Amino acid sequence: MAQVKVLCLYALFLTLTALFITGVNSAVTFTMVNKCQQTIWPGLLSNSGIAPLSTTGFVLQKGESKTINVPTSWGGRFWARTHCTEDSTGKFTCATGDCGSGKLECAGGNAAPPATLAEFTLDGSNGMDFFDVSLVDGYNLPMLVVPQGGTGNNCTSTGCVVDLNGACPSELKVMSVGGENVACKSACEAFRQDEYCCAGAYNNPTTCKPSSYSMLFKKACPSAYSFAYDDKTSTFTCVGANNYLITFCPSPNTSQKSSSSSGQNQEPEDNNNNNEPSTINNSMVYDGAWDISSASLTTCMHVVSSPAIAGAVALLTATFQLHHQLF
């Protein structure tokens, strides 16, 4: 019984500590996961007037992930570079998504189309985060963005989980030196016509209409941007999201778990049974971390309900609320 009480008290301490820390540190994180069958080199670009992040480019081997801390009011984009090489002089180049820096770090360079983009504006209008996955500049890899910890009617996952390279029309295909189909251009990139680029006389939502090419993208990936004015079905918003999970090459059978009544989203379910940690209410929970019987759980409830513990909980909660109000 004493051991169970210690476990209960320790769990309570961790929970309240995490709650307090969350209130103190409101920065957002982005977690990028590479589920592709190849190495990728994510690129990162901050919007104009916004300071660059701590890294603007790095390598992700197959199965690897990386988490990046981002200021609450950050805005910019992420994408994957593929088929990258470094020549004898040290110049770094990629077959798709190259940012032109000649190095692993993009250092302010943008993605050369075609590339699948994840775009974000954090803490925008009414304190909302705005985000989307865009195929306006073409497509090179499947991508899924899942907000975690946020709320809102439109706070849900978005992306393109379909391999569009195989279905790409021949006039839009991008081939590697080895003859592999590695990307699919947008019609704007391929034909350079105002009608496809929403430029000139077509630079407004009335005259800029989806083309047969953008409709091909839209049919395959309904929630992704397919042309410049594809806003209504492609822009998503969240309030209070603490992490955005960006998965490159998510499994085709990846599904979004049903949201809780509060509108929070959970990590996508991976049906490949690869022994990854499960999630409960957007928190990472490792299988086997707790092995407490129902009787022990009852004991936990009894421990928490004791006057001494109730007083400690009240004190910590009051401290947290005061700090939250002040800061």
Image (cartoon, rainbow, N blue to C red):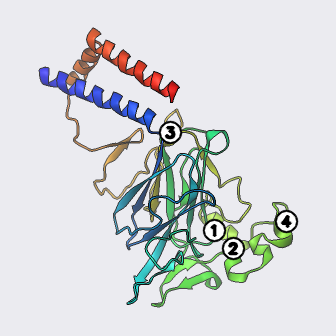
Picture disc at residue 156: none
Picture disc at residue 264: 3
- Please tell me which of labels 3 and 2 falls first in the chain: 2
Query: Are the two marked residues, 2 and 1, in contact with CB atoms closer than 8 angstroms?
Result: yes
13 with respect to 25 (left or right): left
Picture disc at residue 207: 4
Q: CA distance from mark 4 to mark 2?
A: 17 Å
Going 80% across and 66% down the picture, which residue do you hit? 208
217 with respect to 276 (left or right): right
Q: CA distance from mark 3 to mark 1?
A: 28 Å
Q: CA distance from mark 1 to mark 4?
A: 20 Å
Going 56% across and 51% down the picture, which residue do you hit? 74
Query: Are the two marked residues, 4 and 3, in contact with CB atoms closer than 8 angstroms?
Result: no
118 with respect to 30 (left or right): right
Q: Which residue is mark 1?
A: 217
Amino acid type at circle 1 is Phe
Determine whether the residue tagged by mark 3 lies in a helix, strand or loop. Answer: loop
* Residue depth check, mark 3 versus mark 1: number of the one nearer the observer: 3
